[in-house]
Amino acid sequence: MTSDTLDERTLLDRVAGGDRSAFEQLYTVYYPRLFRFLLRYTGSLGHVEELVNDVMLVVWNRASDFRGGSKVSTWILGIAYRKGLKSLERDRRRPHHEDIDEVSLISTEGPEQDLSRRQLRDRVIAALSRLPPEQRAVLELTYYHGCSYPEIAEILGCPHNTVKTRMFHARRKLRDILPELERSAERRGGLDR
């Protein structure tokens, strides 16, 4: 167990005992991570703040339910996944990805490289938004949060092999979607190139 994992477990144990200071520390640690995950997963900037608060309210109310069978981060991201999924179910309209660039707009590269990077980012975001929520979650948790397949299986509440299958299908769909988005941009006369 790493010292970060141990510290998070200690904080969660203190939260279970009603320690508001420990909760504030845990909130501070998890807010950026939850914000990024839920924004990418739901694609709704307008709802992310509320979702993060809903997740942390569950953590506050249910901290004593954590039994230590996983990392604290796995438990909290599992709560976030379920809250995000419920949000998507309530809001069936196609997600609109607002500005979810976590990279600073200040760049040390030239304007052409910066523009190319932004266009690629926008295409990847558009491609991810076309994936089913379960496949998008697997990609987000793997590539943006560094979770292992067993951790993702626990977060999503599904078997390990289901995670592998969702990853396989997500990659295959992205392989088809990304070139399509590139061709679409070229047909528009390179407007976003």
Image (cartoon, rainbow, N blue to C red):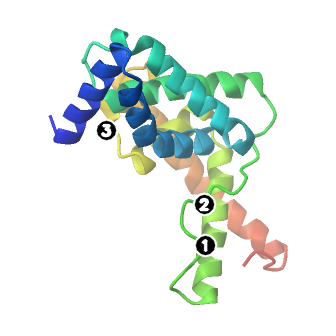
Residue that sits furthest to the top in the current view? 65
Residue drawn at x 38%, y 36% is 25
Dot 2 falls on a residue whose secondary structure is loop
Which residue position is annotated with label 1? 105
The residue at which mark 2 appears reads as 101
Residue 98 in view in this figure: yes
Residue type beneath disc 2? Asp
Of circles 1 and 2, the one toward us is 1
Q: Give me the C-alpha separation between circle 3 and circle 2.
A: 24 Å
Q: Is residue 164 visible?
A: no
Of badges 3 and 2, nearer the viewer stands 2
Rendered location of residue 85, percent (x, y): 61, 25
Frontmost residue, 35 versus 192:
35
**Helix, strand or loop at mark 3:** loop
Residue depicted at x 66% and y 62% = 123
Of marks 1 and 3, the one in the foreground:
1
Q: CA distance from mark 1 to mark 2?
A: 8 Å
Quarter of the image for residue 19 reads top left
Q: Position of residue 45 (x, y in %)?
A: 70, 44
**Which residue is denoted by mark 3 in the rendering?**
148
Q: Do callouts 1 and 2 mark residues in contact (Cβ within 8 Å)? A: yes
Q: Position of residue 49 (x, y in %)?
A: 64, 37
